[in-house]
Amino acid sequence: MKSNFVAVAAIGTAALLTVTACSSSKGGGGSQSKTTATVSAACAPYKDYLGHSGKTVTMFGSILSPESDSLNKSWAAFEKCTGIKISYTGSNDFESQLPVQVQGGSAPNLAIIPQPGLLAQMVKTGQVKAPPAGTVANEANWNAAWKSYGSVNGTFYAAPMSANMKSLVWYSPKLFAAKGYTIPTTWAQLMSLSAKIAADGVKPWCGGIGSGTATGWPATDWVEEAVLGTYGGQVYDDWISHKVKFTDPKIEAAMKTVASYMQNPAWVNGGIGGVKSIATTTFQDAGVPITKGTCGMLQQASFYEAQWPKGTTVSPTGDVFAFYLPAVNSSISTPVEGGGEFVTAFSSDPATQAVQNYLSSPEWADSRIKVAPGWVSANEKVDQSLYTDPIDKISAKYLADSSATFRFDASDAMPAAVGSGAEWKAMTEWFGSGKSIDAVAKEIDAAWPN
Amino acid sequence: MTTTTPPAITTATDEPPVRKVRRAFSSPLASVAVVILAVLWTVPVLGLFVTSLRPKADVASSGWWTVFSHPHFTLSNYNTVLFKGGYNVNSGLAPYIVNSLAITIPATIIPIILASMAAYVLAWVRFKGSDAIFFTIFALQVVPLQMSLVPLLQLYSGGAHIGGITVIPALHLHGSLAEVWLSHTMFSLPLAVFLLHNFISQLPESVIEAARVDGASHLRVYRSIVLPLSMPAIASFAIFQFLWVWNDLLVSLTFAAKTTAAQPLTAQLQQLTGSFGSHLELLTAGAFVSIIIPMIVFFSLQRYFVKGMLAGSVKG
């Protein structure tokens, strides 16, 4: 018995030692992979960022592979020339992990925050560092609205990174060509087109708001489009700050607009089922009926491009494509709803600031666009000719349009308790169990934090 | 364990209660009930397994039960998960199985060593306040570990200071595996001490006294008598702890999230679906891969399990 125990203890100790050895060699491996920075012709564009060789900058975000692989490729040349190593970690629990890490005193050097609401929450902790002068200067390249979303209480903290465009309607160019439908450019045309498609025996709209624990978010986008397209930027901003409540007649009217097409039993849910099936269909599967000719249109963001089944061609003459969602009220100048990420610094060391400056430069955006399609920057200095993907082109055109009424996804900008909580839940009830608009609005207002 | 004669309870049939219960459980009716329960409990696992063998398009469009009428299987999900990776998991899941083992084995052994020593002392070394200490440790089980994540993280990164005096210096373990081991150890100690204390306190007093009379030190008694005799309890706790740490996501995400290279299998499984959950079909295959090692541990230790489950639950 005694010898047994000694053996167990010995194995245990050996295991411990091996593991320790493994982990320490892993840590060492990372810092060895630096190269000495010599200013050659290829490295000339990076001369402003030199002088921090050997430093590692940790970065944390919600972007996962394959998109995160493209990010790593986009700054590979920067790493090689400057000797700064960018260590990116992605997590789909980013929104809950970041506050824990920040409060626990082990914040990453840089965080890529997709919600202005979360950025405001982080600024409140006092640990977000002011951006360096280079980043502040680069900020002029964005639409003024972007700067305001990267600011908290008027102080600018974080520069935007990528952008996505939500004011899109996906359709089948083949079906449209076969039936002689034309792309609508006004709201009235969109509605009469819907009626026409329905008269031809195909349900014009399909949708799905299922998305795991985030079920309901696509419905919040539909309402946001209606609010922005009907009343414009001022009401939209007041709505985000809760000066205009959900129970306000304006917001309820916008919800009625959404209900008039997305909850019209004769118009939805193409190829899937009745109105209630919208709540039970995942957003990933919602567009599939378009490829089968059983649904006319799907209102969904630019990033939906990645969800189409394999072999679907996305082009103006292909299986699927998207058109710009016209404004409900034509007096609003090109309403564009979008989303994006903001590079937030929790460290003010020079290497972190160099990375921050580089990521806010048009040069980095160009480098990222060249790596892979499906990524758009709202930076107005970006070379528009670099976009190869037709959806990227249409998104970039509207996002970098300085005359557009650009607004950030409202649910991301509202406090998390509402924007990623009560609103999702109430919208799901609205579609799933036919709750009245008034009851839905009241429920969301009641959840607003004081 | 000591074999104790059951107290002379005279039942109507003069049968010991244990045998009566055993007979009731082995009746044909009970067997049928057990089989039905077992089948019901296995159905979701079967569904998961069938889904892991189906192509992505099928999974998206129809339920797993339709395979019985339209069989269409593929191993491509397993191929992707094990060898190709791609969706934030470079070169497949295999390296992360090693990470998981590197986290789980020490996080199982350390609490066992500490808790068995503590349990022996609390059970057999009489000193003032030993009961109070035992009850305090027992009471700590009530603290949900979610409450202590942030304070623990602060302790690791900043140390503990009271009025300018450093009580515990900053450990500078930033995201290393040691942080995960320490955390799992802390979270498991209350249950481990409680479970092992109850078992160890039931060991025959005569054996321990005899050893003491022969001049054995406490360490010697612990090593030569207590440890070998409490193997069933230790094994059953080891199974609990191994499965808990292996399946843990929260603690590892909080303490090992800094570098993808140090993350365990569970964290990678969660990333496998990609942004916006576009590769849900891989999750099922990944889940089956992650089950293998806990299954091996469970089956190799299971003969201790039932014995150990009863540890401390009945007074012998």
Image (cartoon, coloured by chain):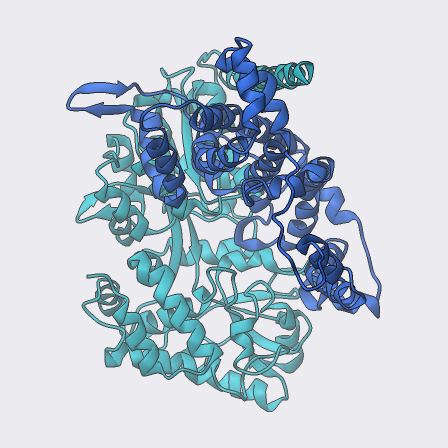
Chain colours: A cyan, B blue
Residue B51, by quadrant, is bottom right
In the displayed structure, A408 sits above or below A259; it is above
Taking B260 as reference, is A84 left or right?
Answer: left
Residue B107 seen from this side: yes
Q: Position of residue B36 (x, y in %)?
A: 74, 66
Q: Quadrant of the C terminus of chain B?
A: top right
Which residue shows up at 40% across the image and 82% down it?
A435
Task: Pick out the residue farthest to the left.
Answer: B163
Which residue shows up at 69% across the image and 67% down it?
B61
Looking at the picture, tell me which residue is in the foreground, B27 or B112: B27
Taking A391 as reference, is B171 left or right?
Answer: left
In the displayed structure, A401 sits above or below B122; it is below
Q: Position of residue A213 (x, y in %)?
A: 48, 59
Which residue shows up at 58% across the image and 80% down it?
A181
Q: Position of residue A266 (x, y in %)?
A: 54, 89
Task: Pick out the residue farthest to the top.
Answer: B215
Taking A432 as reference, is A15 left or right?
Answer: right
Q: Position of residue A425 (x, y in %)?
A: 41, 68
Looking at the picture, tell me which residue is in the foreground, B257 or B188: B188
Looking at the picture, tell me which residue is in the foreground, A395 or B256: B256
